[in-house]
């Protein structure tokens, strides 16, 4: 039987060898006092050889054992395996490519820094392995499929919970508009992210009826989305004044709005 801190926050994975042929299931038990008192941490069906114990405190040594059970009673308990989940880093921030975080672990072997893609830690995304007590790392920036960074503490073959920071898209700049006809307004802008920002995956075009002085934040509505840095609005009325602004989007993160531009349809 083996117990290893799992990747989920404050979780321990327990594995064992199934040596019985007539069990109805397994019960894995936890002890927080070195094996004097035991409580049930979870159960599995027959023939299963692993389980996850969630809600385990960090930096506290816990021990596990496994019992096979059936209608006839319990088997003798397995051997005991113990583990101390390590506390993960917090307050991760990116400042122009410099990652900083708070070291909460008492006995980590070190930290790993990973690139995050749109779904989580990227495949082959490990970019640095750092010594214990480290609280910063210079990344050199975020490019290609990078959407942010993650930092995780490790000890032996166990890992803490993640600290992550996802980088926002840059604010679109230089928005211009042109009322081409009584039924068309053309928009154009630039995508120029600064350090610590990313190029947008798409853009949200927001429109308000009226001039800029009449258009507070609540007055803007989403007119459409665009994948490029131009947009043609064909849903306009002759003689009407509109005010536009544009936001960049990456997944669920959006930028602040661009400058506003106000055309009047002829």
Image (cartoon, helix red, strand yellow):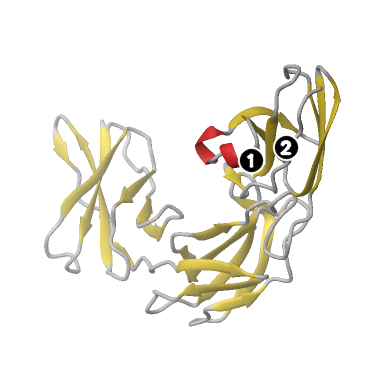
Give SS at disc 1.
helix
Q: Are marks 1 and 2 in contact (CB under 8 Å)?
A: yes
> Residue 76 location, x and y as percent?
19, 49
Q: Residues within 10 Å of mark 2 (few under 14, many from 20)?
A: many
- Compared to residue 249, the image places residue 77 above or below, namely below
Task: Count the numbered circles shown.
Answer: 2
Residue at 72% across, 38% down: 202
Give SS at disc 2.
loop
Residue at 31% across, 39% down: 20
Q: Which mark is residue 212?
A: 1
Front-most of 44 and 120? 120
Front-most of 14 and 58? 58
Residue at 18% across, 65% down: 35
Front-most of 173 and 180? 180
C-alpha gap between disc 1 and disc 2:
7 Å
The residue sitting at the right extreme is: 180
Report which residue position mark 2 lands on. 262
> Residue 171 location, x and y as percent?
69, 52
């Amino acid at each position: 039987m083996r117990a290893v801190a799992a990747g989920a926050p404050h979780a321990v994975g327990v594995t064992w060898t199934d040596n019985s042929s007539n069990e109805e299931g397994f019960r894995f038990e936890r002890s927080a006092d070195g094996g004097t008192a035991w409580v049930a941490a979870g159960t599995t069906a027959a023939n299963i050889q692993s389980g996850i114990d969630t809600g385990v405190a960090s930096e506290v040594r816990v021990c596990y054992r496994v019992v096979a059970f059936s209608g006839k009673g319990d088997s003798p308990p397995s051997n005991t395996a113990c583990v101390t989940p390590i506390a993960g880093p917090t307050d991760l921030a990116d400042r122009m490519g410099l990652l900083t975080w708070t070291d909460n672990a008492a006995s980590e072997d070190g930290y790993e820094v990973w690139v995050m893609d749109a779904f989580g830690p990227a495949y082959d995304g490990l970019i640095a392995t750092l010594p214990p007590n480290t609280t910063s790392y210079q990344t050199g920036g975020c490019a290609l499929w990078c959407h942010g960074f993650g930092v995780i503490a490790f000890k032996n073959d166990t890992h803490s919970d993640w600290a992550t920071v996802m980088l926002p898209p840059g604010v679109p700049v230089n928005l211009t508009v042109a009322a081409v006809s009584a039924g068309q307004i053309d928009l154009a802008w630039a995508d120029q992210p600064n350090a610590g920002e990313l190029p947008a995956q798409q853009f949200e075009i927001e429109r308000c009826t009226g001039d800029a002085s009449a258009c507070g934040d609540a007055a803007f509505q989403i007119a459409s989305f665009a994948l490029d840095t131009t947009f043609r609005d064909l849903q306009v009325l002759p003689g009407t004044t509109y005010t536009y602004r544009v936001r960049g989007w990456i997944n669920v993160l959006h930028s602040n709005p661009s400058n506003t531009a106000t055309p009047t349809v002829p």
